[in-house]
Image: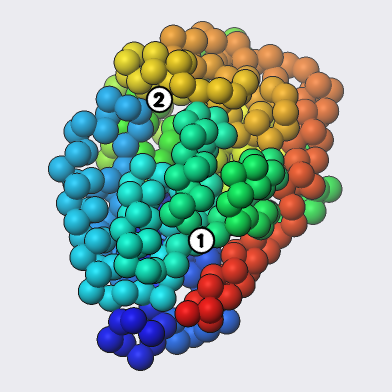
Amino acid sequence: MNHTSSKPCVAIIAGEASGDQYGAKLVRALLRKRPELFFCGIGGPALRQAGVRIVLDAQELTVVGITEVLSKVPGILRGMGVIKKLLKSLKPDLLILIDFPDFNLHIAARAKKLGIPVLYYISPQIWAWRRGRGRRIRKLVDHMAVILPFEEQFYQEFDVPVTFVGHPLLDDALLSAEQTLKNGVQNPAVVGLVPGSREGEVNRLLPTMLDAGNILKQKRKHVTFMISRAASVKRELIRNIIKRYEGWEQVEVVSDGVESVFKRCDAIVAASGTVTLQAAIYGTPAVIIYKVSPVSARLAKLLVRVPHVGLVNLVAGRELAPELLQEKATGDNIARAIQGMLENEEKLNRLRRRLIALRDVLGGAGASDRVAELALKMINAQ
């Protein structure tokens, strides 16, 4: 054991809200198997609650878009310095990296120099862009634990040790397909607005979602809305945006997990990201929207090499959720897409069945336990 404590030490870095949640599930799974483990690293409220000693809050590092990185450069550099000192002083038995590739691959290089084994859980989306990073990952990462079925073959082509562990979202979706599957549309119809887990996303996307809601109210007499607030987003931010829109003062803001929104809504409007796949697992149809700066959007068009942006569409291999990106993400377009879903109940029910079927593609429940077993093998090999 390299560090001074008698307890085995695991460092963990999760820079995104979803990674914070998945990391917390993994930490709990590891503690069930090895209660004496000590955890420290970078993360958010979920990892802290799971028992990780947080040395830097992930919110200081998280950005979207290439140009948006500039505003966070000081925090990112500080974060790199903090974690490098941590690795050097503690020499943990294992470093677990969760997504967040630009930061985490830099840290993986330092861990490699220090002889610290690296388990990468939740692959960077290098199959979408910058495929060449596969060669770098082969040099820096001891094992990849991937959560999307097509990622395993991708890494095998680069000779990276890899295991498909299934998707951790399925650990939460314990209801059977029959219990989850809705039929028809409620009266009034219920539409969920899920503007993202970063405050920048909420600022960009929630106003457009509210515009769409106002248009939908004109098209459809009986419709209500609810807004999902991620734990990483301040309640005041959402309330301040709502205040600018007449007729939204009484809208319900749900803060106890987006799953309750999926269960209660006929359809949702969601920021592109993991949440779109999460909605699919619950059989909830979605319209996907996203906006970044014009420069980031132009660069993405040049670099991205996949036919879809939404994870649900990538896993399905076809468009199950309409994607309205950049200038297409308007109130009119969003309202039209949602109305198209709600007005044809037979078509909506077919879509729900197709979404539920993706559970089989994503593997069974137990992803966190499978990753925990991989982690323990790597710790025991020290």
In the figure, residue 244 lies in which quadrant?
top left
Label 2, secondary structure: give it. Answer: helix
The residue under label 1 is which amino acid type? Asp
Answer few, some or many: residues within 10 Å of disc 1's Cα (few below 14, many 20 plus, some between 14 and 19): some
For the residues marked 1 and 2, what is the alpha-carbon distance in whole angstroms?
38 Å
Q: Which is more toward the observer, 351 or 245? A: 351
Q: Which is more toward the observer, 255 or 379? A: 379
- Whether residue 120 sits left or right of residue 59 in the image: it is right
- Whether residue 29 sits left or right of residue 77 in the image: it is right
Question: Which residue appears at 31% of the width and 82% of the height?
Answer: 3
What residue is disc 2 on?
A: 205
Residue 7 appears at what percent x and percent y? 38, 87
> Residue 142's mark?
1
Can residue 14 be spotted in the picture? yes
* Front of the two marks 1 and 2: 1
The residue under label 2 is which amino acid type? Leu
Quadrant (top left/top right/bottom left/bottom right) for the N terminus = bottom left
Q: Which is more toward the observer, 188 or 282? A: 282
